[in-house]
Amino acid sequence: MAVRTLSHVDVYAGYPEKKVTLYMLMLGFFALLLGTFFGPLQALNYGGIDAYPLLKPLVQSYYQGLTLHGVLNAIIFTQLFAQALLVYLPARELRMRPNMTLAWISWWMAFIGLGIAAIPLLGNAATVLYTFYPPLKGHWAFYVGAAIFVLSSYVSIYLVLDLWRRWKRANPGKITPLVTYLSLTHWLMWFLASLGLVVEVAVFLIPWSLGLIEGVDPLLSRTLFWYTGHPIVYFWLLPAYVVAYTILPKVAGGKLISDPLARLAFLLFLLFSVPVGFHHQFADPGISSGWKFFHTVLTLMVAVPSLMTAFTLAASLENAGRARGGKGLLGWIRALPWGNPVFLGPTLGLISFIPGGAGGFVNASFPLNQVIHNTTWIVGHFHLQVATMVTMSAMGAAFFLIPHLTRKPLVGIGYARASQWLWFIGMNLMGFALHWMGYLGVPRRAHISEVASQYQGAAPFMALNAISGVILFVAAGFFFYVIFATALQNRRLPEAQTPEIPFTEVVSGPEGNRVAQLTDRVGFWFAVAVILIVVAYGLPLIQMFTSLNPVPGMRLW
Amino acid sequence: MQDNHKVVEAYERGWLIFGLAMILVFIVIISYTVLNRGETISRGAGQIDVATVRTTSPFANPRVEQVGGEYVAYVQAFAFGYLPAEIKVKKGVKVTFYITSPDVQHGFYVEGTNINPQIIPGEVTKLEYVFKKAGTYRIVCNEYCGISHAQMFGKIVVEE
């Protein structure tokens, strides 16, 4: 392999969007590095071991560490990965350049917002967890920084809309290419979904934390938070689905079975992602059972595009395994490229998504939710969905994206492989332990090591949880070694050997397909999504806004 | 490849029909449970001025009352405990709980039951339950409420 050292100027000449994408991606993985550091500490806490006294005076309490873990991993990392991947991939697919000034503005907004929010987070002045439920009141800099960070995603929305509009103008009457279509629906969904959070923070929490208003309504705040708080998980998930649909089949050695079905799945996410938030509020007073039931039905409908995805991807992988010479009922599984870390990440993530999704049905089932509401069951659920499926897809993507963007070859492929297997094993053990503990009634978000003797009945699962935390610590160490050693090395491949983005081919394309043509009427479907939201949220929100019951803030940590 | 594709399409249709049927069955079961077993589901019993919770509201005197043949309990969930500190009822008798908070959000998870509402300041939560077994039930706060959240417990004593 010919390797030589080149200056930075050469690498990005002709592709300035590569540099901003790399900065987005690495800022996201840096946040994940910090946030993940606290993960094993949470796991040990639930095993009855309190490691937090060792971190004083840097970190004051378990709850401060938990806030950092949640905010950095679930809000910062996920958004930055979406901003990196789903602006860059459509630009590459369309062979067009996004507006570079705005692209850098979005990076700087994310960076500055993160910096502002980091000060109170690190100073224990905003230990309000990542849900920041009022009337617990954080320092204003936390809300202001978070707002600037989230608003940077609006620039990404505009960048992709602008790419799409320019392409449509140059190609009248043609169907939007697949990756661009999936990215576009993802960003439009996020625009609708983010409005709740934006209103909560900009209209209520920032003025309140600055002392301009006396109190805020906790129920309305919860409702606005969860208006965004459930679809935000699809905002995290869909970039992983883009990897699974448009990259994974090629990496596996095959083709995507159906292009129109991929479009249909994403369209259903655009329609059904947002009007489901009450399923996080089944236990709340002040929302009638009728509305909660309505959101239950809509939530179950969101399972449909994931069921479709499970089928399409499994069929595509079987197709790949057989194309590689796999025979018999299950022989195709052995034939898949299990040695390739780019394949391992998203595939092992998808496997974990099956038990995770099954648990999701329990959470969404209104009366059944009472059994597991606010227990570690919920934590187990989202560690299988977000910390496994979403994060492993991002890890798999990093293994090809960083070499593609920088022309630096991947360092330590053995460590990359081991990191994926260990992450998969660790997260599934943890998911199992947390689900079982939750079923036994162990509360989530609690400094359990203070009172571990109170939960003897769950002791074996709590020990298992602590062990899985240690496994994940090793997995994270391997992963971060690989990506930072890759990104920070001096070797670069010559330009002719730039690794390409492995975009997949499709078995059945969109040309002449009725479904594909219908899904391409993006403006119409966006309007349908708005109507569904108004139906599902209009009346309850009007009622809450017209009977505000403000409550003063408190700092109890 | 073309033939294979037709087979895949047929399987896919079958899978989607299976998925939709499964969801339909779930919706039927959920509807039945909500309508017939919904008494522990948290319901709103109106708003309350948090400033009055500890002074003039019905919660200022946290208690269990006997009304007719049933119990009515007025409970405060506060940082970091519950009032009354011990809720005493008899088994087999319906208890109607009214719960609110004078400060921040809390949980009121009664171990071994389906009682698990969110307690939100400014809102009164109402739910009903019949304890079928005598014994001591622990109440656990399962919503983060501050530094001593993990130590926030309460107690319900159900007598024969």
Image (tube, coloured by chain):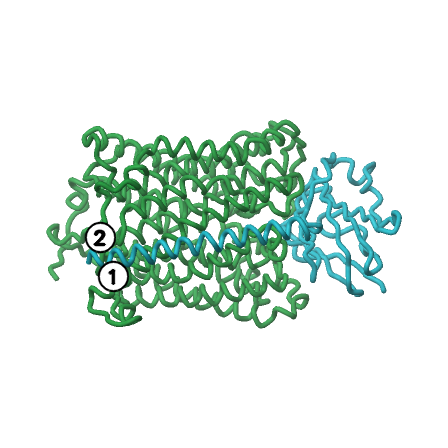
Chain colours: A green, B cyan
Q: Is residue A503 left or right of residue A148?
A: left
Residue A419, placed above or below residue A98: below
- Give the SS element for disc 2: strand
Looking at the image, is mark 1 or mark 2 earlier in the sequence?
1
- Give the SS element for disc 1: helix
Q: Is residue A135 left or right of residue A295?
A: right
Labelled pair 1, 2 in contact (Cβ < 8 Å):
yes
Q: Which residue is mark 2?
A: A507
Q: Chain of mark 1?
A: A
Q: Which quarter shows the N terminus of chain A?
A: bottom left
Q: Chain of mark 2?
A: A
Between B74 and A68, the one nearer to me in the picture: B74
Query: Which residue lies at the image location 74% right of the left edge and 46% below the top edge?
Result: B99
Answer whether residue A547 is visible to the viewer in this image.
Answer: yes
Residue A319's disc number: 1
Between B95 and A234, the one nearer to me in the picture: B95
